[in-house]
Image (tube, grey):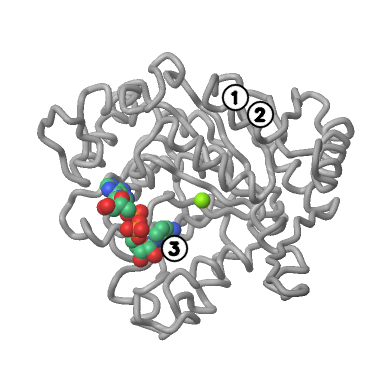
Amino acid sequence: MANPSLLILAGDGIGPEVMAEVKKIIGWMGAKRGVSFDVTEDLVGGCAYDKHGVPLHDDTMAKAQEVDAVLLGAVGGPKYDSLDFSVKPERGLLRLRKEMDLFSNLRPAQCFDALADFSSLKKEVVAGLDIVIVRELTSGVYFGEPRGIFVEGNERVGINTQRYTESEIARVARSAFELARKRGNKVCSMEKANVMESGILWRDVVQEIHDKEYPDVQLSHMYADAGAMQLTRWPKQFDVIVTDNLFGDLLSDLAAMLTGSLGMLPSASLGAPMANGRPKALYEPVHGSAPDIAGTGKANPIACILSFAMALRYSFDMGEDAARVEAAVEKVLADGLRTADLMGPDGGTPISTTQMGDAIVAALDASL
Ligand code: NAI
Ligand code: MG
């Protein structure tokens, strides 16, 4: 069988710095685990604009459509702030998401024990937490028509429309059930079926897809407001949460902050299955290009490394290796190693981006 293929788009600012540490892990996988990836590298964002005059070249877009997974660093920076909207670095990322039709956005909330004290919640509430929010990303109230600000009588009225088709709900539900099968086999779907017709349809379709195609997965339904309460009260009751674009925007940010620092947060955006059965996929840290620390060696590479671990689990069915990478991250944190963003108030000496990457590779070696 052909090697799994990866397109690496490191991007701007700290993107290339954190991606350099991921490449060490990719190299380690080949050398020590006998898993070689066919890696292609290309430009996205400001660096692509500098070379091609556009933030994403058509050839890069075509490559992204062909590979098994895209791994992206970050785009943007002050140098590009004055560019026309049509060629801004972010447009490169938006084009990737749109043309790959990445409708399912995965935001994990995973608690590394060594950082449990960082949480604003009690340690026992977050210790061991490992959940994923699946947010529908390409439809719902951010896109529905009619929309706009209109004049009605003698006042203005602002309108947005929550609109979901059956097929849009079905595909994100399938994405959530597939993930659950690779994890704790449990899905909780969140909407507001008590007050919204789109929520009633959402609940019905998720239940139908479950009954027909995924009866082995445990499914529950919750109103999204109650879900927000439960996420802060006892988040460990969940495994996979699936929800619409708007509620997902809020709930995924809420869930992310149960555990973490921005430098720790990975994400994935998945689309429809390709001919080989793997979903179209783009993995990236949640953070941006961090121009304030770019070039200083202060960037935490863990968010990008954990994004690669998600690729191992969700694109390549290499859950064991994904767990190995996550355990290596847990190990270095437990050893007290911290990049600057993870320093507590009592101080200590932070390590650099490359030192963190090297320590994680050393922990991987020790795991063999
Ligand atoms: P940001 O995420 O780049 O930075 C916010 C703060 O978090 C900064 O103080 C930064 O130093 C810190 N930070 C971020 N990642 C870190 C890491 N891995 N290790 C340690 N500290 C880290 O967001 P900001 O400052 O709002 O945006 C900066 C640029 O990035 C802008 O041009 C923005 O458009 C772009 N951006 C790109 C994104 C992407 O590529 N997906 C997402 C968000 C912003
Ligand atoms: Mg948000």
Residue sticking out furthest to the top: 124
Q: Residues within 10 Å of mark 3 (few under 14, many from 20)?
A: some
Location of residue 282 with respect to 50 vertically, above or below: above
SS at mark 3?
Answer: strand
> Considering the image in quadrants, where does the C terminus appear?
top left
Question: Going 70% across and 43% down the picture, which residue do you hit?
Answer: 175
Give the label on residue 46, or none. Answer: none
Judge: label 1 CB < 8 Å from ligand 2. Answer: no
Q: Which residue type does callout 3 highlight?
A: Thr
Location of residue 121 with respect to 254 vertically, above or below: above
Instruction: Name the side, left or right, on which 218 lies relative to 89.
Output: right
Query: Would you identify the image quadrant in which residue 34 lies?
Result: top left
Q: Which residue is mark 3?
A: 40
Front position in the image: 23 or 197 = 197
Location of residue 63 with respect to 361 vertically, above or below: below
Give the label on residue 226, or none. Answer: 2
Front position in the image: 158 or 274 = 158
How far from the left and from the top, in percent, is residue 276?
69, 51
Q: Which residue is mark 1?
A: 230
Q: Nearer the viewer, mark 2 or mark 3?
A: 2
